[in-house]
Image: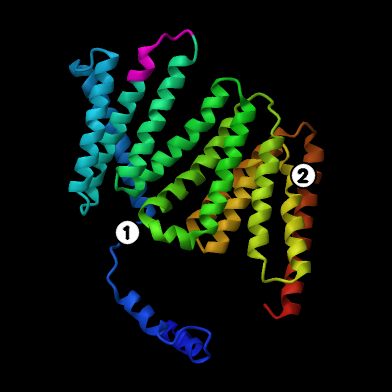
Amino acid sequence: MTLRELLTRLAAERSLPADLPARAAAVLATPRRDQPPWYLHLLVATGSWIAALLLLVFTAMLGVISSSASAILIGAIVVGAAIGLRYLVDRVTWLAQVPLALSTVGALLIFGGVFALGNFADNTSLNRAIGALCVVELLLIAVYPDPLRRLLSALVLAVALCWLPLLNGLPLIAQFVVVTLGWAVALLWRGESWMARHEALLRPVAYGLVFGLFGGLLLLLTEPSPPRMVTSLGLAAALAVVVWSLTLAAGPPTRLATMAGALLLLIPAWQTPGILAAALVLVLGFSRGNRLLLGLGALFLAGFIAFFYYSLATTLLVKSYALIGAGLLLLALRAGLLHAAARSGLL
């Protein structure tokens, strides 16, 4: 059955407005501007970083930057020039890495200039430099018309906000920041239809926050032995809300079973909350049919499970029994879910 036939049948059954098939056909016939695939964005980002580093080295060799004030001034000029140049090359994909590299150089110059303004006896200079970098990245998100730059800016902003409290000995605040990032990811991707109204701005920011969430969790792992209770509970709550919203049309037994399965993840994730974050991204990716989110969730889930396994303070024999038990439990759950789906007619 084609999409036109499906819409026509639903309109005939008065489930949809009668003019919806015609409107849908008009929308589908509208020419769309093709977006390059994600791997091309990755290559452009890699090339821009290499170009940015070369530009920094070349600038240092010329001796143009003689003071902190000059670094900040030149950085601001370069950022402004990058924004203007990006508007000029908006329709030339391969040229987009030139202003992207310039924006990266400008941001790094401002960061370095602010950092060099103070003394290095404490973290004051670094705190100011990170704050200045956050301001620059917010500006780039707002006015730089490029999805890759907005993704990178959201990533840098999220990691910087997690790094600041850790830098100043406030791991609890860093945990709250990570939990906020998890809820932001959940709300943005659950409201993808609303996000489509501001596609150019919100979608790259949403992807950047996913990367930033995992970056913040990796930063938390650098702490010697911090209590991760706040992060685990906050991310478990976000996962439970997403699972609950996805099973609203299911019966009470199914909803309770899915909620119990989501909350059971708290057992291994009590000290490794990255497992909950990866599960959250996996569920969101599956519900939205987004392969990139699915791939990111699976990749980081495997990494955090490996970290959990190697961080267990027990013998290899006990770890082996734990792996066997987990495998048998997953196989039993799979059999139960297949049986339930067959009885309900889903298979």
Please rate how many residues cluster around mark 1, counting C-alpha atoms within 10 Å: few if below 14, some from 14 to 19, many from 20.
Answer: few
How far across and down, in percent of the image, does residue 98 sit? 23, 40
Q: Which quarter of the picture shows residue 178?
A: top right
Is tag 2's residue or tag 1's residue first in the polypeptide sequence? 1
How far across and down, in percent of the image, does residue 55 sit? 24, 28
Q: Is residue 217 visible?
A: no
Relative to 257, 173 lies left or right: left
* Position above or below: 24 against 127: below
Q: CA distance from mark 2 to mark 1?
A: 42 Å
How far across and down, in percent of the image, does residue 170 sit? 61, 24
* Position above or below: 260 against 322: below
Confirm whether the magenta stretch covers residue 20.
no
Q: Which quarter of the picture shows residue 268?
A: top right
- Disc 1, SS: loop
Q: Nearer the viewer, residue 203 or 273?
A: 203
Instruction: Read off the magenta span.
Output: 113-121
- Name the amino acid, label 2: Ile
How far across and down, in percent of the image, does residue 303 sit? 60, 42
Point 76% across, 73% down: residue: 340
Point 79% across, 62% down: residue: 332
Q: Look at mark 1 in the image and give the residue it sits on.
A: 35
Point 77% across, 40% down: residue: 319
Point 70% across, 81% down: residue: 345
Relative to 238, 121 lies left or right: left
- Disc 2, SS: helix
- Name the amino acid, label 1: Gln
Q: Which mark is residue 267?
A: 2
Q: Nearer the viewer, residue 39 or 239?
A: 239
